[in-house]
Image (spheres, helix red, strand yellow):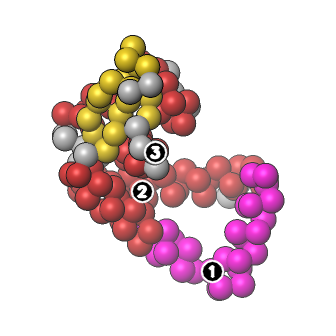
């Protein structure tokens, strides 16, 4: 059993990451790829540097993740209309469908994971975690 609050919180985070990784596997994506797809899907075109920042990885690693997503026809690259030297990454129609599937899988797994908590406990957990991330 974890020794303190931060260890317990990290154990929960690792457990969720493992569960989501297993949920993403049938879709054929790694957790980094799934997260990059989610981040890109939240914007109408995103630079690789912004994807790297959002994932907290190096730009080179972000390039590798986006390369894999592009190879799977989930994202596309095109010139930024405001700066022709820059490249934007956008989600393709296939990527949008995959993103919806990922979101459903993640939501179902989270509902399953948190189902052992009462509604009151879930509300308290949301309030506590919200307070910690502000």
The mark that comes first in sequence, 1 or 3, is: 3
User: Is the residue 133 above or below the residue 87 in the image?
Assistant: below
Residue 9 is left or right of residue 100, and the answer is right
Task: Please name the residue shown 73% across and 61% down the image.
Answer: 129
In the foreground, 66 or 43: 43
The answer to whether marks 2 and 1 mark residues whose Cβ atoms lie closer than 8 Å is no
User: Is the residue 22 above or below the residue 76 in the image?
Assistant: below
User: Is the residue 77 above or below the residue 34 in the image?
Assistant: above
Residue 11 is left or right of residue 110, and the answer is right
Label 3 Cα neighbours within 10 Å, binned few <14 / some 14-19 / many ≥20: few
The answer to whether marks 1 and 3 mark residues whose Cβ atoms lie closer than 8 Å is no
Q: Which residue is mark 2?
A: 20
Q: Give the structural element (helix, strand or loop) at label 2.
A: helix
Q: Which label is found at residue 43? A: 3
Alpha carbons under labels 2 and 1: distance apart: 19 Å
Residue 34 is left or right of residue 95, and the answer is right
**Image coords of residue 122 (percent x, y):** 67, 77
Alpha carbons under labels 1 and 3: distance apart: 33 Å
**Image coords of residue 116 (percent x, y):** 57, 80
In the foreground, 89 or 84: 84
**Image coords of residue 29 (percent x, y):** 29, 46
Can I make out residue 41 in this image?
yes
Residue 65 lies in quadrant: top left
Task: Please name the residue shown 72% across and 70% down the image.
Answer: 125
Q: In the current view of this chain or complex, which residue is farthest to the top?
A: 85
Q: Which residue is mark 1?
A: 117
Residue 26 lies in quadrant: bottom left
Overall secondary structure of the magenta section? helix
Q: Give the extent of the magenta segment.
A: 109-134
């Amino acid at each position: 059993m974890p020794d303190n609050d931060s260890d317990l919180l990290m154990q929960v985070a690792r457990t969720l990451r493992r569960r989501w990784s297993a949920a993403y596997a049938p879709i054929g994506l790694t957790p980094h790829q799934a997260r990059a797809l989610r981040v890109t899907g939240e914007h109408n075109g995103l630079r690789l540097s912004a994807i790297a920042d959002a994932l907290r990885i190096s730009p080179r690693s972000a390039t590798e993740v986006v390369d894999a997503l592009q190879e799977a026809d989930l994202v596309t690259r095109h010139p930024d209309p405001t700066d022709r030297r820059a490249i934007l990454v956008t989600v393709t129609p296939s990527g949008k469908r995959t993103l919806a599937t990922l979101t459903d899988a993640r939501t179902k797994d989270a509902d399953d994971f948190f189902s052992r908590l009462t509604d009151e406990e879930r509300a308290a957990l949301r309030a506590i975690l919200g307070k910690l991330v502000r």
